Amino acid sequence: MNAAAIGGTVATVVLAVFVLLIVVAVIRSVLQVHQGYTVIVERLGKYHKTLTPGLHFLVPFIDSVRQRIDMREQVVPFPPQPVITSDNIVVNIDTVIYYQVTQPEAATYEIADPMSAIEQLAVTTLRNIIGAMDMEQALTGRDQINGQLRGVLDEATGRWGIRVSRVELKAIDPPATVQSAMEQQMKAERDRRAAILTAEGVKQSAILTAEGEKQSAILRAEGQAQSTILKAQGESRAILQVFDAVHRGNADPKLLSYEYIKTLPLIANSSSSKLWIVPTELTAALDAVTKGFSGAGSDEAVAVDFDGEANISDALAATNLEDVDEALASARGEVSKASSEVEDSTLHTGKKLNPADSIVDLPEAGAEEDPEKQ
């Protein structure tokens, strides 16, 4: 191979290398940054500028990309960390941190590993906060823990160009024995509340029942009082009407004696009557009846004043009284029946009865007797 051929080959290779370098330089000089990202550019090893989303041109072999940073909000879960409370109970706490890069230059040059730094700072801060609380406060004070932890992290990461927006505790897991004791305590507390509510319900029910019975008794007493008053008023009106009717009718002794005789069988027929005493005025009443119906005695007619009550006068005038003989016969029968009942009761009781004290002979029709006989 002669020198000319060798020279041509070398020239071709040099040209190819030059072309390749030009292509590589062109490729490296053109940089496209996507939305939501920023790019830190260094020139000769020194910070030069920060590229925002869009198309940018760099100086080949002089400008270089140091770091591509995601400007969106990030979510980083941390593994469970054992923390001791003030009452010496070890709990495992899972934490989630929401952060966002606000200054790409500070996040690149101020901290070497921001995620590790944030994790360690969160663990130490969480232990300080939980160490000042007991178990009950740690379980019920999540909002307080989140607020304190976020304040400490945001203050520390501010100079790193990172903003901590939220800190959340995923879970607080006490030991199994403590959890079982807490469940028993909560069950006892719920049972106590249920018993209190049941007792309150029974109390309210008893009070309402007593109030109802009280109102019912009051209303019932008022009803009975009104009923008694109305009944008494009705009876008083009936008595007044009867009294007025008797006075208007100007009843004579014959009518009263007749009504008296009619009442004697009712007294004798009473189931509670074991001994029947004939009243002393019976003979006088019978004597008045005998005189009235036999025409004996005064021939003066009885005057009845109805004060203009024509209907009552006509009704009483048309009334026919029972014959005196039949009335006396009926009265003797009732007296005999009463006497036989008295004798039967005497046989049952074993006490001897004097007939003269209980039975009286009635007068014949038209005859007159002494007024009292017992």
Image: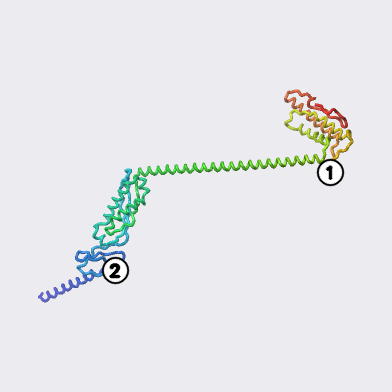
Whole-percent x, y for residue 332 in the image: 82, 31
User: Quick check: 339 left or right of 189?
Assistant: right
Whole-percent x, y for residue 169 in the image: 34, 52
Image height check: is 97 above or below 313?
below
**Mark in front: 2 vs 1:** 1
Residue beneath label 2, please?
54
Mark 2 crowdedness (10 Å alpha carbons): few <14, some 14-19, many ≥20: few
What's the amino acid at mark 1?
Answer: Ser
Quarter of the image with the N terminus is bottom left
Quarter of the image with the C terminus is top right
Q: Which residue corresponds to the image point at 32% horizontal and 52% vertical from the top-left? A: 149
User: Quick check: 161 left or right of 14?
Assistant: right
Mark sitting earlier along the chain (2/1): 2
Q: Which residue corresponds to the image point at 44% horizontal and 42% vertical from the top-left? A: 192
Give the Cα separation between the discs numbered 2 and 1: 132 Å
Q: Which residue corresponds to the image point at 72% horizontal and 42% vertical from the top-left? A: 234
- The residue most toward the front is 307
Mark 1 crowdedness (10 Å alpha carbons): few <14, some 14-19, many ≥20: some
User: Quick check: 192 left or right of 257?
Assistant: left
Residue beneath label 1, please?
313
Image height check: is 38 above or below 152?
below
Q: Quadrant of residue 277?
A: top right
